[in-house]
Image: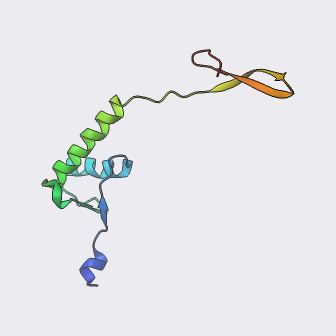
Amino acid sequence: MSKLEYLARPLVAFDPANKQHRKWYYDFLEYGGWGKCPVRFIVPENSGLDLTIMIRNCLIEYYVFREFEPKTKKVDKKVKKTYTRKNKVVTRLLDEHDGTFN
């Protein structure tokens, strides 16, 4: 291993969900260079893009999907009624969102 490899910044794949990666890209835009970034981002060879365009496209995709993807319905359930039927305890749960029994 050469000294340059040993002293070089580590290679990292850009992850738009990682807040620190987005901050480093923001610093790049603000200062016009990667001097303040402690890592080097990897550009896949099959992307055909340079690093800044690849990161921009990743961020656009990340924010568009985050805004428009269907939100999962959080289901909170409460015990409504417990009774016995043929020596079995049956608990009916009430879905708080739509008021139906499950």
**Furthest residue in direction top, as rendered:** 99
Which part of the image, by quadrant, shows the C terminus? top right
Residue 82 horizontal side relative to residue 29, left or right? right
Q: Is residue 25 above or below residue 92?
A: below
Left or right: 61 in relation to 50: right
Give the image location of residue 62, x and y in percent.
Answer: 31, 40
Q: Residue at x 24, y 39 (%)?
A: 60
Q: Quadrant of the N terminus?
A: bottom left
Which residue sits at x=22%, y=58%?
A: 34
Q: Position of residue 90 (x, y in %)?
A: 78, 25
The residue that appears at 26% across and 40% down in the rendered structure is 61
Dividing the picture into quarters, in which one does residue 75 lie?
Answer: top right
**Residue 92 image point, x, y percent:** 72, 22
Q: Nearer the viewer, residue 67 or 6?
A: 67
Q: Nearer the viewer, residue 80 or 16?
A: 80
Horizontal placement of 11 versus 79: left or right?
left
Q: Quadrant of residue 36?
A: bottom left
User: What residue lies at 33% left-to-right and 51% top-to-bottom?
Assistant: 15
Q: Is residue 9 left or right of residue 49?
A: right
